[in-house]
Image (cartoon, helix red, strand yellow):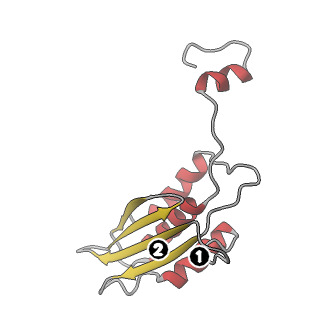
Amino acid sequence: MPRLWLVAAALASSLGWAPIAGAAPLSAKLDVDRAPGAESCPDADALKKQVEALAGAPILSPQTPADLAVRVRIVPKDRGFRAEVFASGARNGERALEDSGPGCEGLGRGLVVILALLLDAPLEPRPPASTRCCSTSTTCPATC
């Protein structure tokens, strides 16, 4: 998965995700644990800097209590690295990400995209498919 960050970025843009007008991104407290052997992977400060640059906001530097806590654990594998991301608070869940290396740059870029998407503003609710199809055409196809 050396090009994981490209896939994640392409997926996010192709889905046409749009934040709710006026909605602010969430804020988080970030904790990164790098297991022995994963020292070449980004630490919390490096991820924070890159995620905030991508988001264009200090989402990992909250001035008030954070909306969620995010913990990242990075471990080396036989080939490459594995990162596990755990979120709790306003959004809960976990994700795992692997990269075959040889270094940790690909995994680091993937983590930046995942964290930025996790903290992005909530998505605007979509109307049912039949409403979307019929509101823009005079005849509704049978598949709507």
Q: Residue furthest right?
A: 22
The residue nearer to you, when weighing 131 against 90, is 90
The quadrant of the image that shows the C terminus is top right
User: Which of marks 2 and 1 precedes in the sequence?
Assistant: 1
Percent across and percent down for residue 110 are 47, 66
Query: What percent of the width, then of the height, locates residue 54?
Result: 64, 69
- Which residue shows up at 45% across the image and 76% down it? 105
Image location (x, y in percent) of residue 102 = 35, 77
Please indicate whether residue 111 sits to the left or right of residue 128 in the image. left
State whether residue 132 is above or below residue 114.
Answer: above
> Which of the 4 image quarters holds residue 107?
bottom left
**Residue that mark 2 sits on:** 108
Q: Amino acid at mark 2?
A: Gly
What residue sits 61% from the left and 68% below the top?
Answer: 27
| Mark 2 surroundings within 10 Å by alpha-carbon count, few (fewer than 14), some (14 through 19), many (20 or more) | many
Closer to us: 57 or 138: 57
1 and 50: which is toward the camera: 50
Of residues 3 and 9, the one nearer the viewer is 9
At x 66%, y 44%, the residue is: 124
Numbered label attached to residue 50:
1
Could you say which disc has been placed on residue 65 in the image? none
Residue 19: x %, y % from top left: 68, 51
Check disc 1 and give the amino acid type. Gln
Do residues under tags 1 and 2 come within 8 Å of each other at their CB atoms? Answer: yes
- Residue 3 visible at all: no
Question: Could you tell me which secondary element the residue under label 1 belongs to?
Answer: helix
